[in-house]
Image: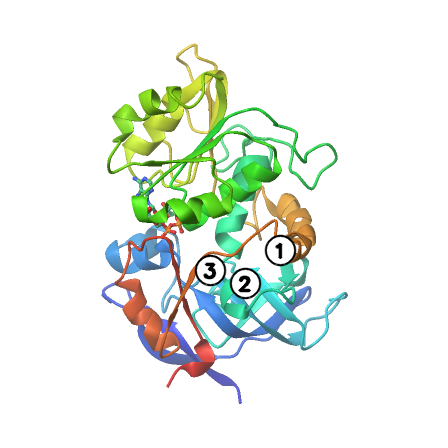
Amino acid sequence: MSQQKALLFLNKDAKKFTLGTRLIPKPGPGQVLIKNKAVAINPIDAYIEKMPGLLDQLGRGYPALAGVDGAGVIQKLGEGVSGWTVGDEIMYEAHDQPDFCTFQEYSLSFAARIAKIPKNLTFDEATTIPLCFAVAAIGLYDAHAEPGAMSGGMALTAPWEEGGRGKYAGQPILVTGGASSVGQFVIQLAKLSGFDPIITTASAHNVGYCKAAGATHVIDYKETPYDQLHAAISKITSEPFQYAFDSIAITKETQQACYDILAPGGTVGLVQNAVVGKPNDVADDGSGKRTAVVFAWIHAGPHVDFATRMYAVLTGMVERGEVKPNKVELLPGGLVGIMGGLGRFPVSGVKLVAHPPETP
Ligand SMILES: NC(=O)c1ccc[n+]([C@@H]2O[C@H](COP(=O)([O-])OP(=O)(O)OC[C@H]3O[C@@H](n4cnc5c(N)ncnc54)[C@H](OP(=O)(O)O)[C@@H]3O)[C@@H](O)[C@H]2O)c1
């Protein structure tokens, strides 16, 4: 068998993904071939259908594929791969080339940046972790961007590095969007880093979800709009905020709220292009505030080394319950289910997951 089922965005004028077939790729040096058991949908996958021209902007050719999160079983090892065996169950983040995307039955990945799924996690749970955990971890802990680079971190010390665990004890942090997938992981990591209080924003029905991740205070942003957030937070703590993380960042209000809460010299992490401060630099306004714009590119670019170290510790963190998966909603129908799931965005406090082997 050399053909597999895949979701294809056939050309520039296509409005939607369609189910098609393509060759099962062969792993190159340092790569593995994975049979996908569960894959998750992220907003970027939904944006492809919602924002015509996005694939061109991203420089993707056609037919294009999507899918960034995957969990499955290693089928083949490429040349030079060691430490992995056929049959290992792993989770992984895709690279942006078609053979690596996850909305297909078989994908490639890089052996240096995949993580074994521990026994306490299902494939469905595992596939909720890779992309959004990476953006949270890179955003908080990787180095500031080099001048002119598009992506950089806030340069905190990671909890898996010496002196990192609990290092920020007693310091407050604001994390907007605690019920989002990214927000969940930022909160979990902020807790390991010792931040307290960890203040987040979410809808009322997601308060428990945010608290289970480690938030100490959850503010309902529908009841307390972002222009009143500062006043609400001042009732919780009078400590200065050196750090804030905007896990949403798609509109100015969340970016502005995070930027405004910062004390002079503070740093904000953003998961979308900046509309506050100076991207990946210190603002010109004399405040000394730094804006870190992060993109979770882990297989090329500035974050490869950080991501390789992060993948080496991920399994242990999940096994110990320090990193918890998102809530899962399983879509029936395999890859066909994803086609319906893409139209469900934005979602609330859940990750949509599908099983490629169940594709009719
Ligand atoms: N830079 C990167 O590499 C990268 C990677 C992944 C994602 N992202 C971006 O990160 C953002 C989050 O992605 P995701 O996958 O975590 O999204 P998601 O899980 O699909 O986010 C859904 C959640 O967002 C929350 N939300 C929406 N607007 C909000 C607001 N104004 N304030 C507070 N919460 C709000 C909703 O909370 P309630 O239901 O509680 O209202 C909902 O639960 C998106 O902009 C995405 O494109 C960037």
> Residue flagged by tag 2: what amino acid is it?
Ala
Residue 300 at x, y percent in the picture? 57, 50
Q: Does the Cβ of the disc 3 residue fall within 8 Å of ligand 1?
A: yes
Q: For the view shown, which residue lies furthest in the top direction?
A: 286
User: Which residue is denoted by mark 3 in the rendering?
Assistant: 68
Number of the label disc, if any, that sits on residue 126 = 2
> Residue flagged by tag 3: what amino acid is it?
Val
**Relative to 78, does residue 196 appear above or below in the rendering?**
above
Q: Tag count in the figure?
A: 3
Q: Dividing the image into 4 quarters, which one contains the C terminus? A: bottom left
Q: Give the crowd class for mark 3: few <14, some 14-19, many >=20 residues within 10 Å.
A: many
Badge 1 or badge 2: first in the primary sequence: 2
User: How far, Cα to Cα, is label 2 from label 3?
Assistant: 13 Å
- Where disc 3 sits, the SS reads loop
Q: Are marks 1 and 3 in contact (CB under 8 Å)?
A: no
Q: Give the image quarter of residue 259.
A: top left
**Relative to 100, does residue 20 appear above or below in the rendering?**
below
Q: Going 46% across and 67% down the picture, which residue do you hit? A: 39
User: How far, Cα to Cα, is label 1 from label 2?
Assistant: 9 Å
Point out the frontmost of discs 1 and 3: 1
Specify whether 246 is left or right of 121.
Answer: left
**Can residue 206 be seen here?**
yes
Q: For the view shown, which residue lies furthest in the bottom direction?
A: 1
Q: Are marks 1 and 2 in contact (CB under 8 Å)?
A: yes
Residue 70 at x, y percent in the picture? 51, 65
Specify whether 341 is left or right of 97.
Answer: left
> Residue flagged by tag 1: what amino acid is it?
Val
